[in-house]
Image (spheres, grey):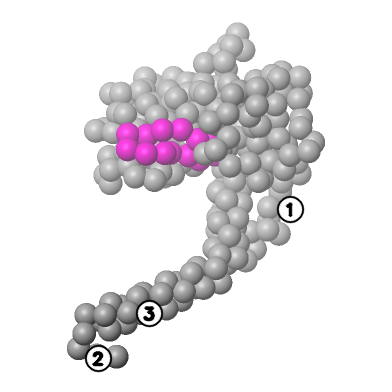
Amino acid sequence: MNRNSNAYTFIFAIIIVTIIAGLLAFTATSLKPLQDTNVKAEKMQNILGTIGVTGISREDAQAEFDKYITKRLALTNQGTVDAKTDAFKIGLKNEIKKSEDEQRYPLYVAEKEGETFYIVPLYGAGLWDAIWGYIALASDQNTIVGANFDHKGETPGLGAEITTDWFQAQFTGKKILDESNNFVSVTAVKGGAKAGDDHGVDAISGGTITSNGVSNMIEERLSHYLPYFKNN
């Protein structure tokens, strides 16, 4: 075949593209088990981080997770436990697309230094894309002991501030129930929460929509756990 012909150039390009595509597919397939392991370890690190267990390497994540997490429950909207579903395998991104009665709500029960904690996974919407995280409640199922949040595409310096220590630390010590044990959740307040407000934190300056997204996410997700907490 004439190497200077258009046909030769076209065939050569197809061969090269096919080889490269094959190599990329092989690489992606080969790396997937490692990627899955890293995602699993990071998830465990984030869950444990809400109860103050930090500085864990990915290699030690499984052992530490098994040490502190005593139960991982998949709850129904009525507060019962679905024993057939593994809470750790529930992907909230897809789960929230179902009706409330069809959804399963993962809950992690932890024991640390003789105290019991309840860790609730979160998923919601920010300004540009999804936000998510975990929030941990003390044994009274009311007092927040830790929270962490993450995002896919919020603006650096604005909505992306939900990942910072200063924002997340505000939630520690806040209450999700009022004095009459009514669920009121916790709200990020534009302009700043008032001193002594057990249910408010300072919203992010310039990141109002993302702050509201965090508030809505916490309220919506926690509301589904109230039947379980009431019965337990």
Q: Are marks 1 and 2 in contact (CB under 8 Å)?
A: no
Q: Is residue 131 magenta?
A: yes
**Figure disc tally:** 3
Could you tell me which quadrant the C terminus lies in? top right
Q: In the image, what residue occupies the spot 63% across and 41% down?
A: 90
Q: In this picture, is 56 found above or below 214?
A: below
Residue drawn at x 32%, y 82% as measured from the top left: 12
Q: Secondary structure at mark 3?
A: helix
Which residue is pictured at 71% across the width and 20% down the height? 78
Kind of residue sitting beneath label 3: Ile
Q: Residue at x 37, y 26 (%)?
A: 212
Our reading of the magenta stretch's main secondary structure is: strand
- Which residue is under mark 3? 15
User: Along the polypeptide, which appears first: circle 1 or circle 2?
Assistant: 2
Q: Secondary structure at mark 2?
A: loop
Front residue of this view, candidates 92 and 108: 92
Q: Which residue is mark 2?
A: 2
Kindly report which numbered mark, 1 or 2, lies closer to the viewer in this rendering.
2
Where, by quadrant of the figure, is residue 3 drawn?
A: bottom left
Query: What separation in Å lies between label 1 and label 2 (alpha carbons)?
Result: 69 Å
Q: Which residues are magenta?
A: 122-136
Name the mark nearer the viewer: 2 or 3.
2
Label 1 sits on residue: 67
